[in-house]
Amino acid sequence: MPGKTEFTAAPFIPPHPTLQSLKAAASGCQGCPLYERATQTVFGEGPARAKIIFVGEQPGDQEDLQGKPFVGPAGRLLDQALEEAEIDRRMVYVTNAVKHFKWQSRGKRRIHQKPTGLEISACHPWLEAELAVIHPEVVVALGATAAQSLMGPKFRVTKERGVFFPHSQARWFMATIHPSALLRMPEPQKRREEYQLFVNDLRRIRTKVAQTPQNAETQPMAGAVPRPRRN
């Protein structure tokens, strides 16, 4: 096990990776202590040539139990929004910045606990490898943790939501709200309004992908600035 300041999944990344070999290797990842309490690694899922990758924060309780990303309440809301935006869920890749469920007990329930910067950085080699294998047209961060994992700690979803940026591992990067944030909104009218904004963001992503010539290979944007690294 690496020392406290050496947490990283990098040694577990296989040479010449494919999605299949990455998923197999990730099942044994011990790059940070989160694996000790999680049921299993929850790796990304979707086609190897997906044009869109959605990145969330981490798996939740249902994802941890089933071993699949976005299968809980937030995942079902994402499915609904994708359908309204006319994006086929089967054609996108979904994953998380952190691959193990971090939780705390509250009675008999396991409650989501936000991962630390060290845990996010430790897991980042998996996300980088997924992006490198897939070469997406657009990588979409769902929520602040995913956005900062991809764009650095100074990125703010509240200020930059819905804006397309060049990215070093995709043509475009865009950040939007995480579906779980919608579920936590207590006021029904506010929740409906924010859900519609979320669907609108997804429609803009579909339009962006549709604007790419069909014969153009999906490669990182020329001149894109690499993601700032944490110290």
Image: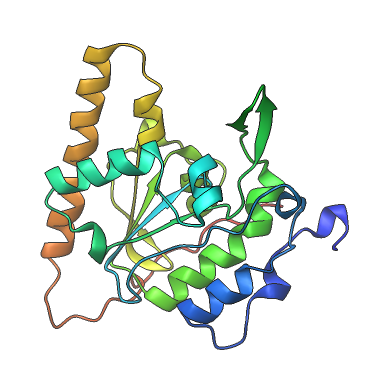
Pick out the residue farthest to the bottom.
16
Q: Residue furthest right?
A: 3
Tell me if residue 97 comes above or below residue 45 in the rendering.
above
- How far across and how far down the image is residue 33, in percent? 77, 51
**Residue pictured at 61% horizontal, 35% vertical:** 114
Which x, y percent locates residue 21? 54, 81
Visible in this render: residue 178? no
Horizontal side of 72 relative to 36 (left or right) equals left
Count of all numbered marks drawn on residues in the image? 0
Q: Residue at x 62, y 57 (%)?
A: 40
- Residue at image position (18%, 62%) is 209
Image quadrant of residue 1? Answer: bottom right
The spot of residue 216 in percent (x, y) is 18, 80
Residue sticking out furthest to the front:
108
Is 179 located above or below residue 3 in the figure?
Answer: above
Residue 215 in view: yes
Q: In the rendering, at what x and y percent does residue 100 appear?
A: 61, 52
Looking at the image, residue 108 sits to the left or right of residue 133; the answer is right
Q: What colour scheme was applied to this rendering of the protein?
A: rainbow
Is the residue 127 above or below the residue 144 in the image? below
| Residue in the foreground of this view, choosing between 168 and 199 | 199
Q: Residue at x 12, y 55 (%)?
A: 207
The residue closer to the viewer here, 1 or 4, is 1
